[in-house]
Image (spheres, helix red, strand yellow):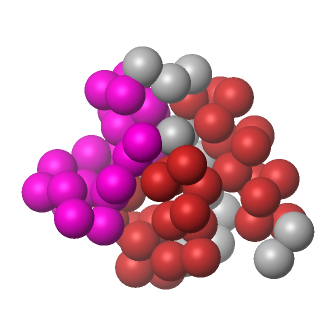
Amino acid sequence: MEIKRDTMIADIIEQCPQAMPAFQAIGMHCMGCALASGETLEEACYAHEVDPDLFLEKLKEYLATL
């Protein structure tokens, strides 16, 4: 799955559940969040005061190690 800034959190959870530890490591507990179904990666990052480009880079690095 290609994850971009505009990818919906719900799609990431559904299609790439192995990504969740990277979210949890920065305080995003998206699996239980009601907003996950209607929020993009970018929106979630801004809500958690995280730079979306930096997080996306770290997320891709993390997923490459799996």
Q: Is residue 28 magenta?
A: yes
Q: Is residue 20 magenta?
A: no
Query: Which residue is drawn at the image coordinates 51% and 65% (left, top)?
Result: 20
Query: Which residue is drawn at the image coordinates 39% and 46% (left, top)?
Result: 28
Q: In this view, does 19 lie above or below 18?
A: above
> In front: 57, or 65?
65
Q: Is residue 52 above or below residue 3?
A: above
Q: Quadrant of the C terminus?
A: bottom right
Let me know if residue 50 appears in the view.
yes
Q: Where is residue 19 in the image (x, y as percent from the top left)?
A: 58, 66
Query: In terms of image quadrants, where is residue 27?
Result: top left
Answer left or right for 23 relative to 43. right
Answer left or right for 35 relative to 12. left
Q: Where is residue 26 in the image (x, y as percent from the top left)?
A: 52, 40
Magenta residues span 27-48
Query: Which residue is drawn at the image coordinates 32% and 57% (left, top)?
Result: 30
Answer left or right for 36 relative to 9. left
Q: In which quarter of the image is the N terminus?
A: bottom right
Q: Please count the marks in the image.
A: 0
